[in-house]
Image (cartoon, coloured by chain):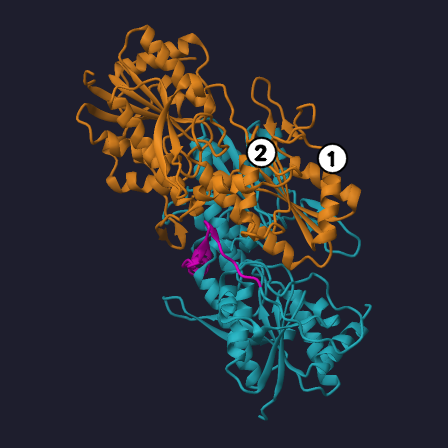
Chain colours: A orange, B cyan
Amino acid sequence: MTELSGNCLIGQSGGPAAVVNASVAGIVTEALNHGCIEEVYGALGGVAGLLHEELIDLAAESQQTIRGLRYTPGAALGSCRAKLKKPQDFERALEVLKTHNIRYYFHIGDGDSQETAAKLAELAKAQEYDLRVIGVPKTIDNDLPGTDHCPGYGSAAKFIATTVRELAADAEATALHDIVTIVEVMGRNTGWLAAAASLAKRRDQPNDPPHLVYLPEVAFSAEKFVEDVRRILKREKHCVVVVGEGLVDKDGNYVAVETTEVGAPAQLGGVGEHLRDLAEAQLGVKVRVARLGVTQRAAAHLASKTDSEEAFLAGQAAVKAAINGETDKMVTLLRGDGDHYTCETGLASFADVVGNTKKLPREWINEDGVSMNFQFYRYATPLIQGELTIPFENGLPSYVRLHGERVGKQLGGYES
Amino acid sequence: MTELSGNCLIGQSGGPAAVVNASVAGIVTEALNHGCIEEVYGALGGVAGLLHEELIDLAAESQQTIRGLRYTPGAALGSCRAKLKKPQDFERALEVLKTHNIRYYFHIGDGDSQETAAKLAELAKAQEYDLRVIGVPKTIDNDLPGTDHCPGYGSAAKFIATTVRELAADAEATALHDIVTIVEVMGRNTGWLAAAASLAKRRDQPNDPPHLVYLPEVAFSAEKFVEDVRRILKREKHCVVVVGEGLVDKDGNYVAVETTEVGAPAQLGGVGEHLRDLAEAQLGVKVRVARLGVTQRAAAHLASKTDSEEAFLAGQAAVKAAINGETDKMVTLLRGDGDHYTCETGLASFADVVGNTKKLPREWINEDGVSMNFQFYRYATPLIQGELTIPFENGLPSYVRLHGERVGKQLGGYES
């Protein structure tokens, strides 16, 4: 393998997460170990930065700042939901890469993001431009195939389970009469996040809250929901329900869609209120709805140390793979076979990742459809282990911002 | 002063908070130091436990459990919103106290709770039953008069400011075009909690989020709100708005009331959505609403150490005061005059506390009506300092539950 010399570029895209910046830190740290990588750049605002040549010099950041990225939420480079769509967008992106002699491109993001990276790799190949493209997975939804789990999931899971435990303590304190707490969590098409709420149960206490978990993998029935809640309220003083925003009925239609912008994915939300209305009307109980919203992906103050370390590791692995000549692949996380949890990185072809969604295995869900069995607990428990040591200043977590030294533009403006 | 021998009883009422159990721990710990206090009981479910003679033996709990109360959210004894209303309810409550030889009654709660305690003290006096009643303040709303601040406030403030900082990082990451984040916080009639969000600004960075804070103390105008947001979006890539649920218009009417149950206080909420609709309609921007809900009073995992310690201290002080012959009073927190924050306890007559609400001083709010000045920062910053060391088990905070050994009932049932 010939050594490929040139610059490297990092882009973030898709929704932010508590640990997505830890992958940036991993890439920067590792890139500086390799002499063949000259400059380490970041693209501002994901693919938008690529199109508009908005690049910053990450090697110019202080070491303190790069270390701070390991516990700073959001997406320090800026992210975007926009995808490269038209052929000329891809042409332009490649032109920007060539102009700045980018030979290593690292794209941190969810499934859609990996697709963009794959197409860019394809175009470079067609134009015989020697570019190595490696994706780094990131999604709290945990729905990427080919990897045991995704960076971002463990921290969101830890926050959700903690919050459900705390909300349950609050409900229990006031549960003089039947009270139902509904917690709505994210998860567009999969129940990984909703299932994570089950971790709030203490071991061997299956009757602990959450009492009912509604997953996108199990077709929702309003009648069954009402009966489920009724059953719990016979047994318990109060009932904690967790529901994934992407809940669908037996025909596969979302149970609650908030808004639909033309050309944009349906904006989910409101399923918590939908269930509240059902319970109040059918059972006459008092219902509180907590919609965790963006907090579940932003709560770096309660990030999983395991998740943060693996996000960093995935960033490092991306650089090592590219240096070793790999391209057109996404870093994966592989779980060891032993009883004790271990995690290594691997690689999967973009082709095997893009366009596929990994759902919760049906056999990890109990027959009642509203609770998880030991297979899920065995899977998810290691992912939420450990707490980060975050510096606090004036009583609050002290997160970092990039200084963001701009790389000079060499091309004219671009209109997509 | 004659020494008064007998048993003591603790009741919790009103909404739970992250540190309300720390006051229980303070009372139990201190009570066991005094030989004249024989048994240490807790009333289950606040005044409901008192009426129905549902008492537990707190001295029988393990020391480990009592220590665990210092970081366990909710209300370990159970709370309730119900008040003693009818004269026969007070008669019954006093009968229960007499039957169990309760000579010391400690009531932890908000303003309404202190009123109940005051009336009980009055009735005991009228019947010449030697009873010492001391209240311990607790409210995240921070609206009790006679005390510099209330246990519960500092922790809610810390959680709110942290969450606003994290939500802002998330919004900034995706702020390719104008985006407005609206964070709705609690605070029935006062803006103490909404104002606390301002602590998320870094020192000397007045342009940091939150950019706009709407307080119940400042009459809301839809026109001004729209202009405020427009102004911020001219200057910044995105706008973070914080709003207190108890926002009122110039006529003193709540801007958003969710439901009104007959005979119950208006259920506030929905003001975030109300502002969202305004901004979307008038400015055509994308708006995200985060309603922090119960999480802001339940998030013990991010409790303020200062707050937790003061809640414990207030519990201890209640016992010491009662032993010293005080009754019919609430413990207060007094701030020292020096530059360095110090806090001692004092006492206020129930008469001076009950029925009054402490609002944010107008002179702590800037003239723009949507931001706080240095006087507020000086006041609130010390209250959010420090983090608790909470034991984590299997990746989650390990909170405690009371064993709850019942005290035998000696009276017949009671129907209110």
- Residue at 68 percent across and 57 percent down: it is A175
Task: Let me know if residue B390 is in the magenta part.
Answer: yes
Please state the extent of the stretch shown in magenta in the rendering. Answer: B375-401
Task: Let me know if residue A1 is in the magenta part.
Answer: no
Question: Does residue A129 appear to the left or right of B322 in the view shown?
Answer: left
- Residue linked to disc 2: A363
Pointer 2 indicates a residue of which chain? A
Q: Tell if the residue under mark 2 belongs to the same chain as the one under mark 1.
A: yes
Tally of marks: 2
- Residue at 57 percent across and 39 percent down: it is B225
Q: Nearer the viewer, residue A296 or B380?
A: A296
- Mark 2 surroundings within 10 Å by alpha-carbon count, few (fewer than 14), some (14 through 19), many (20 or more): few
Pointer 1 indicates a residue of which chain? A
Tell me residue B283's x, y (percent). Answer: 57, 29
Helix, strand or loop for disc 2? helix
Q: Quadrant of the N terminus of chain A?
A: top left
Residue B375, placed above or below residue A385? below
Res. B356 visible in picture: no
Q: Nearer the viewer, residue B94 or B144?
A: B94
How far apart, in angstroms, are the residues tagged by discs 2 and 1? 23 Å
- Residue linked to disc 1: A222
Tell me residue B152's x, y (percent). Answer: 54, 61
Residue B219, placed above or below residue A270? below
Helix, strand or loop for disc 1? helix
The amino acid marked with disc number 2 is Glu
Question: Does residue A209 appear to the left or right of A39 in the view shown?
Answer: right
